[in-house]
Amino acid sequence: MPGTPQEVMIACPFEDLLFGGARGGGKTYGMLGDWLSHADLYGANAYGVFFRKTYPELEQVQEYAQKIFPLVGGVYKGDKRTWIFPNGAKLKMRYLERDSDADRYQGHEYTWMCFEEIVNWASPKPIDKLRACLRSGAGVPCYFRATGNPGGVGHNWVKARYVDPAPARTPFYDEEQKVTRIYIPATLDDNTRLLEADPNYWKRIEASANGDEQLLRAWRYGDWDIVAGGMLDDVFDRTRHIIKGFQIPFSWYVDRTFDWGSSSPFSVIWWAESDGTTAPNGITYPRGTVFAISEWYGWNGKPNEGNKLLAHEIADGIIEREQLGVLKNLIINDGAADTQIWQADPLIGISIADEMAERGVSWLKADKTPGSRKQGWQRLRRFLKAAKQHPMEDAGLFVFDNCTQWIRTVPVLPRYEKDRDDVDPKAEDHAGDATRYRLSYAVQDAGSYETGVPYS
Ligand SMILES: Nc1ncnc2c1ncn2[C@@H]1O[C@H](COP(=O)(O)OP(=O)(O)OP(=O)(O)O)[C@@H](O)[C@H]1O
Ligand SMILES: [Mg+2]
């Protein structure tokens, strides 16, 4: 398909299209143009909705729209946040900040839908819900349009959906969603108008990338092969990693790890490590495969806020929990905990570790050498990847479905903007930390943690 990216995009007959890949490529202008073309063709039967993630972002688009739409007689009805055109076509301007907002559109009917900067949505769930509203009683062909650059929280799912399956400008059929998709890239170099009118545009973009070379490359050339998005979202698969609990065979090694917190949550996770014998669910996992079998998350019900229990209360709670459910009758070994708990409180001269030991709960020191944190995330990625293999060849990691706080917080751990190999230190990473501690040793070949074989 020859032509400028905007021309190709507007002429594109395929139902589902991603436009963009770089900053300043003319994405927003292009999409408003695409809507005008749709409105022109189908008149009163054209009903569109334009989404952005937040209100301030929508305002920006609105500024563009104010410049263009009135030229063809478009009138904006502020109370309805809708553009009305002389031939009866209508375009709603909306933002979709929370995923649950998608539910409010149930039963609506649109012929054209655009998600601007689609990588700002961490998951395709709300978007797919809204796609169901694309239909026309009048038989108008319906179109789904999105724009986006590499590097947002949704980087991985957007790349997997639009960029990886086929070369650019080549339509392909998605069997699962029964739709023909296409990716049409546009870079700043395609936008000669902007290059001429605003030679300093790129300098401003450079400033906003904050010294992140990778992001800059992505924004300049539309390169999707950068490390971005969540730490685990390309390796985690809910249908594979979350499993129904089972009775732990007595020959497996069981222990617990601990990430301390008071005003932020603490996380205790109990683990079982397979020795290669068949599990009660009939599956033989490779020796060394670890399972999060139970958890205790010390939070007050609000994300990243702790319940402020005292050390001895946590110790008592652990002992209590070890008499119940899946943990009952198991030999539970001491596992690793965050080294911070060995620091004595200067006022009372006793550490959290001491206080817990007095109640009968002891810990081993987690690896705190520089680089161990990043190494831990790498290992977690490797274990999750191994668990997705059919058949599995290497030790993997699985989580029993009762570990709801692990499931809530770990799969979505964000990468740190300043160092993409690390998780953002401000994220709710407590269950993630307790998981890293467990993955720093393998016990099956050694019998205990002290002599455990460290994973490389
Ligand atoms: N078809 C066009 N006609 C006239 N000017 C255009 C056209 N397309 C783009 N431009 C100019 O290029 C500028 C950048 O375009 P636009 O904002 O659509 O790019 P973008 O890819 O959405 O950028 P960003 O990545 O910053 O969101 C616009 O402000 C406008 O001045
Ligand atoms: Mg834009």
Image (cartoon, rainbow, N blue to C red):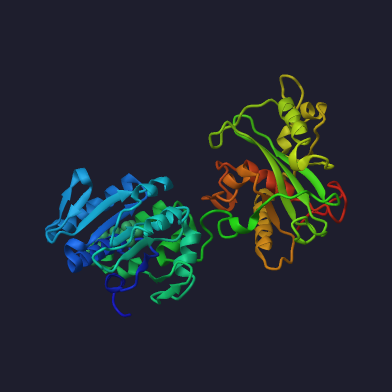
Q: Nearer the viewer, residue 339 or 84?
A: 84
**Image-based side of 417 in relation to 331, left or right:** left
Q: Which of the 4 image quarters holds residue 19?
A: bottom left
Is 53 located above or below residue 137 in the figure? above
Q: Nearer the viewer, residue 348 or 240?
A: 240
Q: Residue at x 42, y 66 (%)?
A: 222
Residue 127 place in picture, x, y as percent:
41, 56
Is 50 located above or below residue 335 in the figure? below
Residue 125 place in picture, x, y as percent:
46, 54
Q: Residue at x 34, y 50 (%)?
A: 105
Whether residue 113 appears in this view of the structure is yes
Q: Which of the 4 image quarters holds residue 426?
A: top right
Residue 219 place in picture, x, y as percent:
41, 61
Q: Quadrant of ligand 2?
A: bottom left
Residue 9 place in picture, x, y as percent:
30, 70
Q: In this view, which residue lies farthest toward the top?
A: 347
Q: Nearer the viewer, residue 39 or 34?
A: 39
